Image (spheres, rainbow, N blue to C red):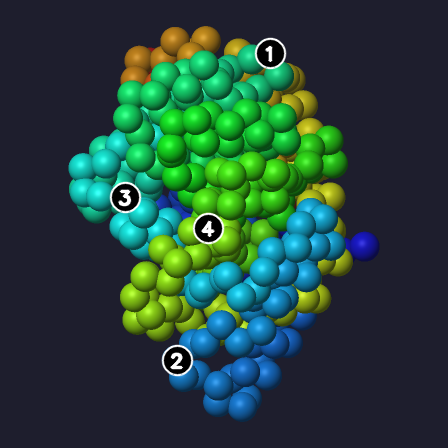
Amino acid sequence: MSHPLSALGLAELRERGSVKWRWFPPDVLPAWVAEMDTPLAPPITDALVAAVRRGDTGYATPAGLPEAFAEFASRRYGWQPDPARMTLMPDVMRGIVETLTVITEPGAAVVVNTPVYSPFFFWLEHMGRRVVQSTLRLTDHGYRLDLDRLERDFAAGAAAYLMCNPHNPTGAVFTREELLAAAELADRHGVRVVVDEIHAPLTYPEARHVPFASLPAEAARRSVIAVSASKAWNLAGLKASLLVAGPDVWPDVQRIPEEISYAASIFGVVASEAAFRDGEPWLDELLADLDANRARLGSLLADHIPEIGYHPPQGTYLTWLDCRSLRLPGDPAEIFLEHGKVAVNSGPTFGDGGDGFVRLNLATAPDHLAEAVRRIGVALHAVSNGTSQ
């Protein structure tokens, strides 16, 4: 068995030109943005090399991507979406924006479950929609949907519900029962549902991803799901995703201008099709590494910084760390960066419920993860002693 997360050393990673490795100075260990420290899966490399050799560098079409995703979804989730109701988008966020543009009016209220992926706020406000922050419920076992809060927010006049499942940043994977309850509320209040399922392939053994569109509910027939291979196979820079529309919303999705799809990359389509068709063995190896890392992080924190609260994610390679008990004199992310030279994401950028939290990316080599925890410890020691490094 190969170990994708252990394949590359820091020197090789620092040669990359991506935002993870170029945003901060070289003395900072990046553990923030959602990029993985892996090589490409071999089937993806082979497909991209073949495309370059044949000079296949023109404008993108969906090609066989919808069929490849449908087959993957059938194998992985027991769901058989219709390729004829899929449309190519450059990325998941653009697909969400274009969907909400055609199914809601300017000024409409869109509900999101906070803390949540921070670009949701920028893009909803940029397109003139009103963000309604419906906070998740923190339990002894992690975050869950607060259905009472969700009903109040729907009843207040929401036009749409932008769900993220698996959830970024908390790592929650919502159960079938939770999703059915949310769908019932959406039906009751006439709320349209759009779901970001970009992290769906990254679900751990104790959880099961249930595509919202697979539910036996009217809300599912009116839902739009945004999917991509970009997170599970580390393809974010190649730009390709799909919108999967329920039968009752497909006429709306067809009103998205065809020109939007031309912003997708042909290399993104090639790589994504290879991922969904032939990338599952590599994905399973990756998930084993990530599973070990989420347990390793728990042990590292328990041994060295037990004050930090940690619920292992059920999905994604992102972890949501509760630093409130540290009683730090400011944003923990800023303190860890300044005094420990480790970059994590600032909790407040994820909306309500983010104060005192940070998001840490564990899709890296085990020794890099241990170094990140060590640097956080250095930062805490420096602050407690009134020193800096």
SS at circle 1: loop
| Separation of marks 3 and 2 at Cα, in angstroms | 30 Å
Circle number at residue 248: 4
- Residue reaching furthest bottom? 54
Q: Which residue is mark 3?
A: 104
The residue lying at 45 percent from left, 76 percent from top is 61
Q: Earlier in the sequence, mark 2 or mark 4?
A: 2
The residue lying at 32 percent from left, 61 percent from top is 256
Q: Nearer the viewer, residue 166 or 223?
A: 223
Circle number at residue 140: 1
Q: Which residue is mark 2?
A: 59
| Separation of marks 1 and 4 at Cα, in angstroms | 38 Å
Q: Nearer the viewer, residue 86 or 190?
A: 190
Residue 270 against residue 302 in the figure, above or below: below
Q: Quadrant of the C terminus?
A: top left
| Separation of marks 4 and 3 at Cα, in angstroms | 15 Å
Classify 10 Å Cα crowding around label 4: few (below 14), some (14-19), many (20 and above): some
Circles 1, 2 touching at the beta carbon (< 8 Å): no
| Separation of marks 2 and 4 at Cα, in angstroms | 30 Å
